[in-house]
Image: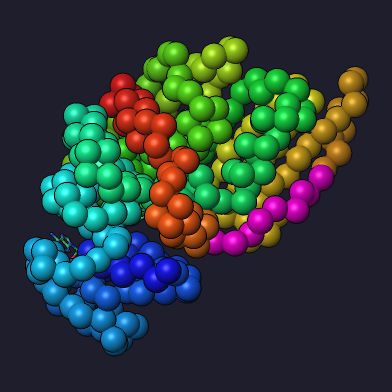
Amino acid sequence: MTLKVAIIGYGYWGPKLARNIQNSNNFDIKFIIDTSINNLNKAKKNFPLCQFYKDYRKLNSKKVDLVVISTPTKTHFKMANHFLNKTNVLIEKPLALKLNDVVKLEKLSLRKKKKLFVDYPFIFSGSIKYLKDIINQKKYGKLLEIESFREQAPIRNDADVVWDLGVHDISILRYLLNTNPKKIKSVKYNTIKTKKKDTAYINLEYKNNLKVFIKNSWISPLKIRLIKFKFQKAIIICDENEPIYKLKVFTKKKLSSIYKLDLPEIDLSEPLFNLINYVSKSIETNKNKIFEKKFNIDVTKVLERI
Ligand SMILES: NC(=O)c1ccc[n+]([C@@H]2O[C@H](COP(=O)([O-])OP(=O)(O)OC[C@H]3O[C@@H](n4cnc5c(N)ncnc54)[C@H](O)[C@@H]3O)[C@@H](O)[C@H]2O)c1
């Protein structure tokens, strides 16, 4: 089965989605839409056989199986609402800027029997999948504490740092723990004169007394994507910036101060490619295991409370 695709938004992230879709055998990119002529010209070089438009409404008369939306966040709700009436949608995180809008989109997707996927790439990474298995099997005992540091990203003017970067942490936590936090405390502020809050310190408490700390900031010379998982019998450090050794498992004997380090073998394929494969399989089998259990609603509830 080859699915006909339209991509809307060919700025920073759109080309990465397009490359991964092109590399999968299950899709055929037919249309690329962007309001910027410059970006459309870039797309033409890479995808000369596509049709190109500036206005997404040109797609109304076309047959497409999947619309991929990678435009600025403030445009998401209107576009997803438009396309879910007739086809499946893969949209960039964050899905929308209000819980109400996310609820409306989820209802529309159910009513129209069209699938809604959100690109939270890290939940499709080999390291997070490995951690999910470790947590489910309780391999290192109870999970006591998680600390996440996510710093540096393009400054946005339509979403604050929590909706832009923190959404990765919240989606990872929802995926790993299958639940939302019971308590939420946070401090958000502007380090520099950005339109939206550029820095956040977040404390969450989940069931079984699991404590989570998250630091998000756009303002950093270094790109940091680091999460520490503290179990009873091990501390696992997950660094998505590492090319190969993304997970480091530290264990130690009681009373010893020296840790032993293990480097587990994990799936290193690009998370976006795994997401694209998930999307094609989901459309083919008519199942959407990850997103059907109110995933997006749960994630957005937490973002709104923070
Ligand atoms: N999943 C991730 O890890 C990840 C990473 C980066 C960005 N994103 C998300 O992707 C989205 C886009 O971010 P970006 O960094 O690529 O932004 P960007 O500004 O670089 O690109 C957006 C593109 O959309 C086009 N556009 C704007 N309005 C349009 C419209 N009405 N119709 C058609 N095209 C339109 C712009 O011309 C631009 O080319 C954001 O929601 C962002 O949060 C996700």
Q: Residue at x 62, y 56 (%)?
A: 242
**What x and y, as percent, mark residue 45?**
30, 86
Q: Is residue 36 above or below residue 244?
A: below
| Snapshot colouring | rainbow
Q: Residue 105 appears in which quarter of the rendering?
A: top left
Q: Residue at x 62, y 51 (%)?
A: 126
Q: Quadrant of the C terminus?
A: top left
Q: Residue 294 appears in which quarter of the rendering?
A: top left
Callout count: 0
Q: Is residue 71 above or below residue 201?
A: below
- For the magenta stretch, what is the residue range? 262-270
Q: Residue at x 47, y 31 (%)?
A: 174
The quarter of the picture showing ligand 1: bottom left
The answer to whether residue 47 of the structure is visible from this angle is yes
**What x and y, as percent, mark residue 206?**
51, 17
As drawn, is 248 to the left or to the right of 37? right
Q: Is residue 173 above or below residue 123?
A: above
Q: Nearer the viewer, residue 68 or 162?
A: 68
Instruction: Tell whether position 186 is magenta.
Output: no
Q: Quadrant of the N terminus?
A: bottom left
As drawn, is 73 to the left or to the right of 94? left
Instruction: Tell whether position 267 is magenta.
Output: yes
Q: Nearer the viewer, residue 197 or 19?
A: 19
As drawn, is 175 to the left or to the right of 202? right
Q: Nearer the viewer, residue 254 or 79?
A: 79
**What x and y, as percent, mark residue 69?**
26, 57
Q: Main secondary structure of the magenta part?
A: loop
The answer to whether residue 80 of the structure is visible from this angle is no
Q: Residue at x 32, y 54 (%)?
A: 90
Q: Nearer the viewer, residue 289 or 161?
A: 289
**What x and y, as percent, mark residue 121?**
46, 51
